[in-house]
Image (cartoon, grey):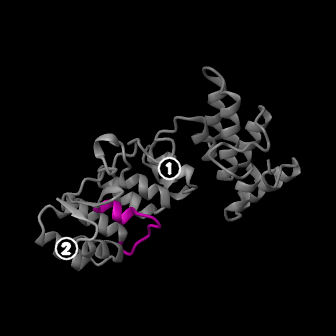
């Protein structure tokens, strides 16, 4: 079933999904066979109903229950978004990757329990997994949830962003050592995650104090200071300042 975004049915189901109107949603699902797997299409492409529940900014009323209802009705938790020409863009994002991008941890858990593939690739961060989306957007609650469910930590910057210093050490001890750029990226990510010990380890091995990745704008000190200041993050910020880290990027 394909619905145009301006169709009456599409409008009604979107309001029910985002408003947590379970009665209306159940009534529409019962009256319209195939609605649970329908695609809503506009000029930018198409998405399924589970994408509506996980759309930015997330945290819609009764979101986890809505996810459960849709999956019970036949919705595919691994459906992907499609571009305006699906044949040229086969690797859109899954609902879990969207939930990972707004840190809606309860909806993410409902998707995982409903069969979402946590290792599906194609995310907006480096074409990677839901974990990479969560890390890339600073959505630490979903990142931790994904780890609890067995998400793979395959890259140095993953481990650094999550404060997994022992895993970071293994990247230096096993196989070819990380490149300087990989070390610098990992240092920036450790600062983004708020992990002083991990940052110190990478700095001691040559990571640059004021490195700014091509995908970011702030210095390590800037990114470390942006989030709410818990005790661990404050320790990192104080250490960076003691090292004379730049508080902001220098204009070119």
Residue segment shown in magenta: 49-62
Residue at point 78% right, 44% down? 210
Instruction: Please name whichever residue, 218 or 62, is drawn nearer the observer in this view of the structure.
Output: 218
Locate residue 200: give its quadrant.
top right
Q: Is residue 115 shown left or right of residue 235?
A: left
Q: Is residue 9 shown left or right of residue 170?
A: left
Q: Quadrant of the N terminus?
A: bottom left
Q: Earlier in the sequence, mark 2 or mark 1?
A: 2
Secondary structure beneath dot 2 equals helix
Give the numbered dot on residue 37: none
Q: CA distance from mark 2 to mark 1?
A: 31 Å
Q: Position of residue 180 (x, y in %)?
A: 71, 30
What residue is shown with label 1? 133
Is residue 50 on the magenta stretch? Answer: yes
Q: Is residue 53 shown left or right of residue 174?
A: left
Is residue 174 on the magenta stretch? Answer: no
Other residues around mark 2 within 10 Å, as few (<14) / some (14–19) / many (≥20): some
Farthest residue toward the front?
Answer: 43
Does residue 229 lie above or below 27 as drawn?
above
Q: Position of residue 181 (x, y in %)?
A: 68, 33
Secondary structure beneath dot 1 equals helix
Residue at point 60% right, 35% down? 156
Does residue 177 lie above or below 25 as drawn?
above
Does residue 204 lie above or below 10 as drawn?
above
What residue is shown with label 2? 26
Q: Is residue 150 shown left or right of residue 80?
A: right
Residue at point 24% right, 65% down? 4
Instruction: Please name whichever residue, 88 or 59, is drawn nearer the observer in this view of the structure.
Output: 88
Q: Position of residue 22 (x, y in %)?
A: 26, 76
Instruction: Please name whichever residue, 73 or 92, is drawn nearer the observer in this view of the structure.
Output: 92
């Amino acid at each position: 079933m394909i619905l145009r975004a301006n169709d009456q049915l599409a409008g009604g189901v979107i309001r029910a999904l985002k408003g947590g109107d379970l009665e209306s949603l159940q009534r529409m699902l019962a009256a319209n066979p195939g609605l649970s797997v329908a695609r809503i299409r506009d000029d930018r492409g198409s998405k399924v109903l589970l994408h509506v529940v996980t759309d930015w900014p997330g945290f819609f009323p009764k979101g986890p229950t809505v996810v459960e209802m849709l999956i019970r009705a036949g919705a595919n938790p691994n459906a992907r978004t499609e571009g305006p020409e699906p044949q040229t863009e086969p690797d859109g994002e899954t609902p879990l990757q969207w939930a990972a991008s707004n840190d809606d941890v309860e909806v993410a858990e409902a998707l995982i329990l409903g069969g979402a593939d946590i290792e599906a690739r194609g995310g907006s961060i480096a074409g990677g997994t839901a974990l990479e989306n969560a890390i890339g957007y600073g959505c630490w609650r979903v990142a931790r949830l994904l780890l609890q469910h067995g998400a793979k930590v395959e890259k140095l910057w993953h481990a650094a962003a999550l404060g997994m210093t022992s895993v970071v050490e293994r990247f230096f001890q096993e196989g070819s050592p990380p490149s300087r750029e990989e070390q610098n990226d990992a240092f920036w990510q450790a600062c983004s995650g708020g992990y002083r010990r991990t940052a110190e380890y990478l700095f001691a091995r040559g990571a640059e104090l004021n490195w700014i990745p091509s995908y970011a704008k702030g210095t390590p000190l800037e990114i470390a200071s942006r989030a709410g200041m818990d005790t661990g993050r404050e320790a990192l910020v104080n250490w960076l300042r003691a090292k004379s880290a730049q508080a902001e990027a220098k204009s070119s």
